[in-house]
Image (cartoon, rainbow, N blue to C red):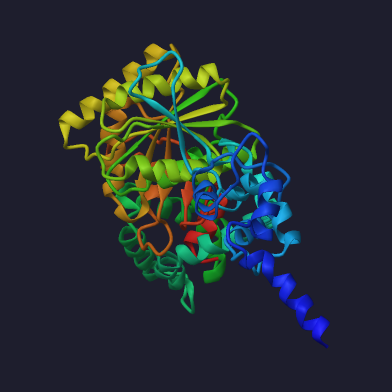
Amino acid sequence: MFSFFRRKKSEKQPSEAPGQQPDEARVEESAAPQSEPALEPAPAVEQVQQDDAPVAGTPPADAAEPIAAATLEPETAAPEQVEPQAPVSAAPQAEQSEPEPVADAPVAASSASTDVVEPVGVVGEASTSSVEEPAPEPAAAAPSEATVKKSWLSRLKQGLSRTGQSIGGIFVGVKVDEDLFEELETALIMADAGMEATEKLLTALRARVKKERLTEAQAVKAALQEILAEHLAPLEKTFPLNSAKPLVVMIAGVNGAGKTTSIGKLAHAFQGQGASVLLAAADTFRAAAREQLMEWGARNNVTVVAQEGGDPAAVAFDAVNAGRARQAGVVMVDTAGRLPTQLHLMEELKKIKRVVGKADGDAPHEVLLVVDGNTGQNAISQVKAFDAAIGLTGLIVTKLDGTAKGGALAALAAGSQGVRPIPVYWIGVGEGMHDLQPFVAREFSSALLGE
């Protein structure tokens, strides 16, 4: 019994003897390199916060134990917990789990004030070695083309339901007589089809009814649908994606029409067709316009050429040169929104087009106008003014969901107000990535009449 107490006392003496090193300190000193002093608890924590070079292959969970062991009291820390203190430098990987969202780099052979904003996925490759497994976005966001088209057609019909109810509802429980044609004329005018298009459609419909001796209202409705599809057919045209490399596309429109959003959706669609895309943020005046386009670029993994506050023509010029150097498939130039009555801004738009032509003699290959589908007949005047200024090659009609003025395209096809029938490449019915689809006259006619 007495020997047992003496032995316990002798085990405590090394930690109580003055001037003698504790066991924890000896183990820490032996684990540290000979050329460096022993690590102390506080500097070890500071090193974890400041070190920016993670060691590949070391999981953050293993690196956390040496840090905790280094800050324990000498009597409670076991030697087995102190030995892993050598890989303390691997701990910063827990703090640097994601790359920086946007990295700026100067454009080669261009002005020093213009930046190329690389897509998020290009900055480093930390996404492959990150602690958190990436979400299976490709598998989840890979619906078949038929599924996307079917879903979009249903949204198109739902979006044009207000127009469809005003026109298609006339054919319910009525006789085929002159009263039907009068009501139909009023409905088409109210849908902003315009007088010229309305007269042309009704003249063709009267002739069809008389020739085929149609007596049922639904048969008359089907005949009107075919006549409307034939009327809209000149507006249907496939976008020439591979006609040039890079294909320089200049996009204009009034404020709030949805230019930047349409550019983001088109970038996604072009990539789906195998074309590489580069974006130019030539809208240097609107607040957050540059950031909005950069966000779309990050979402689509697309490079953005941007400049904070400067000449929009210079940004467009640098973007075309960068697209040629990078062998991009498409270069889309976003411009600031403006009204046709703002003559100084329309002159600036002309300047952008001229400067782009200096970077590439044939550019811009496509000049597109984004039109808000809710504006109705005002869209015709916009098309006429912008076409006179910069020579439009195509239209993008947005926000057709929920509008009662879907007949404006019929007015455009009829050459209302002296405007030439410019092709409608895409129409939009929502804010989703797939809600901007190519214009098909027969599909639009069917949705417009409430089929």
Front residue of this view, candidates 305 and 202: 305
Residue reaching furthest to the front: 2
**Residue 128 sits in which quadrant?**
top right
Does 340 appear above or below 249?
below
Q: Residue at position x 47%, y 49% from top?
A: 427
- Residue 139 in sight from this viewpoint: no
2 or 124: nearer the eye?
2
* Quadrant (top left/top right/bottom left/bottom right) for the C terminus: bottom right
* Residue at the (74%, 71%) spot, across then down: 11
Q: Is residue 79 above or below residue 306?
A: below
Q: Position of residue 143 (x, y in %)?
A: 69, 55
Q: Quadrant of residue 151?
A: bottom right
Q: How many marks?
A: 0
Residue at image coords 56%, 51%: 442
Image location of residue 218, percent across then percent down? 55, 69
Query: How far from the left and from the top, in percent, is residue 145?
Result: 68, 51
Residue 250: image quadrant is: top left
Query: Is 169 on the left-hand or right-hand side of 1?
Result: left
Task: Work out whether 71 lies above or below 195.
Answer: below
Picture residue at 54% right of the left edge, 34% below the top:
239
Q: Nearer the viewer, residue 7 or 53?
A: 7
Quadrant in which the N terminus is drawn: bottom right
Q: Give x and y (percent) for residue 342.
A: 16, 35
Q: Is residue 52 left or right of residue 290?
A: right
Is residue 323 at least partly visible in the picture? yes
